[in-house]
Amino acid sequence: MDLIIEKNYEDMSRRAATIIADEIRKKPNLVMALPTGGTPLGTFEELVRMHREKNLDFSSAISFNIDEYVPLKPDNPQSYYYYMNENLYKKTNIKPENTFVPNVLDKDVEKVCREYENNISRCGGLDFILLGIGNDGHIGFNEPDDELFAYTHLANLSESTIKANSRFFSSPDEVPTQAITMGVGTILKAKKIVLIASGENKAAIVNKFLNSSVVTPQLPASFLLLHRNVTVIIDEAAAALHKKTASKTTHYSF
Ligand code: PGA
């Protein structure tokens, strides 16, 4: 696992966007999975800038949402498809037919999850995934639990996640309590993983994650230790606690 500590949010975002842009230039039909939330907004802004100013071409790229709230329609401003459309898709030349989100309106959840996995496979599998990390250590909506789902599934959001995400809603009661999310196995099958985190409120979980040497479903991000191509990009604020304990930490690149 490689760790990059950038000075601030802007630099973290630029670094993540540069990695994604390089991947797209190397493989124009890159199959990527992208997250939502506050952290990736700067990364998407930078990708849009590169599209406008540096001809970064999304015309063959394929994008899968990592997750979607149940049961929000794609045109609901709180849905994650809407978010992706507003922040990236409609500001680039990605083709709408190359953008995927689990169909959370279909009641046959098992079929929807199976189809989502099949769609990823049909596109050749994920080349790249960008992840955030929740304050509780979740990746996607894989919340800490006694066991984790390997593949795309219906997830119940933890109290901590509902509280964290309520900042995007007028009240915590409005936050959906369920989502369809890629599983930890879906994530680990991506060829390259980049995780981004920013700000002092992520310092504790970032420190816990970077110090972890065991894989436990109680810390879903710890499963990233099993992957051979993970880059963690954080800013100074998110790195604050880790820097104090860094001498105790060993990072393995393999
Ligand atoms: P955030 O969410 O970027 O809004 O902090 C991260 C996450 O929950 O994965």
Image (tube, helix red, strand yellow):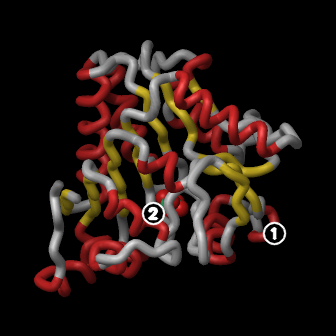
Q: Position of residue 131 (x, y in %)?
A: 43, 52
Q: Quadrant of residue 103?
A: top right
Q: Nearer the viewer, mark 1 or mark 2?
A: 2
Q: CA distance from mark 1 to mark 2?
A: 23 Å
- Left or right of 228? Residue 108 is right
Please say whether residue 12 is visible from this viewpoint: yes
Disc 1: which residue: 173
Disc 2: which residue: 133
Going from N to C along the chain, the mark reached first, 1 or 2, is 2
Q: Position of residue 159 (x, y in %)?
A: 68, 76
- For the C terminus, give its image quadrant: bottom left
Q: Position of residue 60 (x, y in %)?
A: 43, 14
The amino acid on which the numbered mark 2 sits, given as a three-letter code, is Ile
Please say whether residue 6 is visible from this viewpoint: no
The amino acid on which the numbered mark 1 sits, given as a three-letter code, is Asp
Q: Position of residue 171 (x, y in %)?
A: 76, 68
Whether label 2 lies within 8 Å of ligand 1 gets the answer: yes
